[in-house]
Image (cartoon, rainbow, N blue to C red):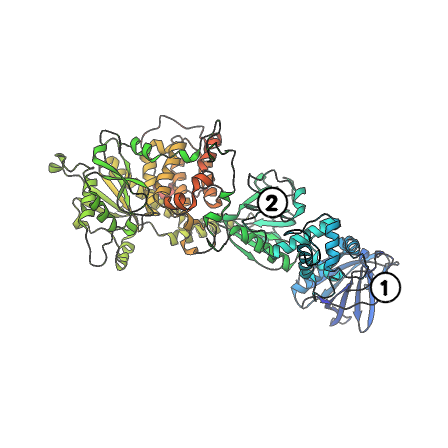
Amino acid sequence: MSALYADSRQQARTSAASSAVEFGGGRTVIDFQASVKNAIGFLTRLTLQLDLQAMVLRQIRKGESVGVALDCIVSASVGKGRSEVDVQIMTGGGEHEGQGHLLGGAPATARTQKFFFGNGEDAARFQVHVSVMKESGRKLKLIFDEIDRRGTGHITARELLRAMRENEMAALEGEEGGEGGAGLKEAQEMVNLADADTNSGIDFAEFFRLFMFTPCVTVHQALSEWRNKLTLVQKRPSAASPRIISTRVDKFDSSWAVKGEFIMNVVENVRYSFGYKARDNLDGEYNHHWAGTLSVTNYRLVLSSVHGGAKTTGTRHEIAPYFDRMDIPANTISSVQKLDSSCLMIMCKDLRPILCSFEPNDLFVTTLVNAIEMIAFPTNQKNKGGPADTFAFNFVLDFANNAQGKRGSMAGLVNGWDLYDPMKELERIGLINGPHSRFYRLWSDKFTMSETYPKNFVVPSGMSESEIMKAAKFRSKSRMPAVSWRCKKNGAVLVRSAQPMVGLKGSRNESDEKLLNLYRVKGDPHNPLELDDPSQLYILDARKMIAATGNQVQGKGTEVIGNYSHCELTYCNIENIHTMRESINNLGSACLCLDAATKDTKQTYTDQVNNSGWLRHVQGVLKAAVLCCERIELNDSSVLVHCSDGWDRTSQMSATAMLCMDSYYRTIEGFAVLIEKEWLEFGHKFKDRHGQGNDKHPNERSPVFVQWLDAVHQIMRQYPNAFEFNERLLVFLADMVHSCLFGTFLGNCAKEREMVLDVKNKTVSIWTYVLMKRDIFTNNTYDKNSTHTVWPSTSIKQIQVWT
């Protein structure tokens, strides 16, 4: 049962230990219904009364009242039963009000008595009220008295407005104005926030509740926090007009903030814990938690330990430097859940469950959840939340605007947006401006044929424009077979596409068949060697055969191999995005449940990792890529890879195979080009797969790109000297793909990034930062002469959890 507020307008008795401040009227008493055990063990009902003016705790039973000064209360704590509170008081002497004693016993002796409540919430409320009243009651009384100049025991809107003016605090909107102006309106809204009846103003009981969990020592501080609470309730500020909503944030260190980032609010005295057993870590026997502050900015949440590497009270282990400050970018947040009046759980897309605990305050936790959701899932009427609302459009690197007003180069810096040049890359692999470029042509239609394909891509020159258009229509989303890479040793090409539209009737398309035949002969249909020893085209379908066949019901499917000359079809058995999402969640649970105090930890961890299937899925990607390399390098044959729509598993297979066969992609610049080409230009749906700027469509989320980074990590482990970059770059990319700090991964396709978001002119490229911090991401053991094809082992024994 919630606390009941008694109407106690009569003069309250004041003990010698109470403050000298007295109120002329208004409620100064808070009542709680509880029970105590009598001599024979039966519960007897009574009323526990907190007199906020007299600073006395009274016990009222059968019309009799005895009390004790708050100074004599040693502690009040919730008992093991959760619905009982243990109150420890120094008894004896002249501490108690009147003639009676709340607790019996010898003089100057500490005794404890249990008070029983109807439920755990009531017990927690009482315990918190007593603790806060003991610690902050007198300070709040002095602040209240300074605002209540008339001494009526109530704070009205006009008195509040006067206090704000005296403390040089302007209205939130517009000028203060006179009667009916913005200042008075705001003051009235602040009064309404705490006033139960909104008629006579705020009495001290309501004022006490308002600031229970916000320690204040000055009027200005109290007014600032009061305004802050109003702002949170009203869900301000808007994304369009960012500003600091709490004047207290200035006292906190913000040296970690990036340019464009500002602190919106700071919550002190926060306990936080991580992992699968986060709640147990806070309340249980392990006590693996940290204490500090929670800073809410327009980009992230920052949990800062106040112990700075020292041992936190109640914690068994030293705090690692990593935990001194934990950053949670807003877009990394998957969900925010209020567990109760004192706890909220933040689930992150990078698998971190983070639990924050505060003093019990239902309104505060609710408004904090709303404030976090505002920055994690920004919503406006035009965009309904999305990449355009992310912090990337506010972030400014040390990469100033040039004279033309666009983001250009500064001395010593390279603009990451200029790193990938499609024409240079196509020339490098011999598809244009080379001795064999006559067999291929550049198709440029500015996203007309397929909205999710690059603006420029390569197809065989033997295809006419009409045939190219017909072949595109035969593929899902018009994602026709296009060249990704060409082997300089044998001329074989790696081609990617979406699934064909064969359907249940086994439809065929002459243009598509001609196109694949041209890829089979490496673009030269008149090669005389093809007459005696025809080349083979290998089609690698990433899916299982049952999945590919099932898509025929939707008018799609896979190639009818009899319609194509000298072709071989192989199913690579890589699971879909939904299976991968479930798999990584299970892997996260396995990793996060580790605890030094858990029995059989190793066996449980191993079993859970195996049951998650994640390592087997990474193995499947590597197997498909190695098979692709074998067909091109050892069989001298061209390969077509595709899945359903050609933007998830297809990117994994093609990018991994190219990484193995071409040492350029194992350099820092080359790796950036590889990601730009195979993932960004060919339309991997980063917006949907990572939920950029919204919490909608959870079934579209999947760790496809992160899984590919894991596959790259497995290859790096086996060939540590073959890569110019180190594991830090992979971890950095895995973090940044969620954070939306840079514009590189925003949106679902190149067309959206260029024509809708305009990321090149409005955001910073992630490659700008990578090249600026090149030393951090460089592998010191890199062998520049390691230009051969790498052949990673695909044995499950070689696949390890990426930690």
Q: Is residue 492 left or right of residue 166?
A: left
Q: Which numbered disc, 1 or 2, marks the residue that appears first in the sequence?
A: 1
Task: Give the x, y percent position of residue 246.
Answer: 65, 48
* Residue under the image location 19 percent in, 47 percent down: 511
- Mark 1–mark 2 Cα distance, whole angstroms, equals 45 Å
Q: Nearer the viewer, residue 29 or 489?
A: 29
Residue 45 in sight from this viewpoint: yes
Q: Residue furthest bottom?
A: 62
Q: Quick one: SS at disc 1?
A: loop
Q: Quick one: SS at disc 2?
A: strand
Task: Give the x, y percent position of residue 643.
Answer: 30, 49
Q: Residues within 10 Å of mark 1 (few under 14, many from 20)?
A: some
Task: Give the x, y percent position of residue 308.
Answer: 64, 40
The residue where tag 2 is placed is: 263
Front: mark 1 or 2: 2
Identity, as a three-letter code, of the amino acid under mark 2: Ile
Q: Nearer the viewer, residue 740 or 276?
A: 740
Q: Can you say whether 540 is above or below 507 in the image?
A: above
The residue where tag 1 is placed is: 13
Q: Nearer the viewer, residue 126 or 327?
A: 327
Identity, as a three-letter code, of the amino acid under mark 1: Arg
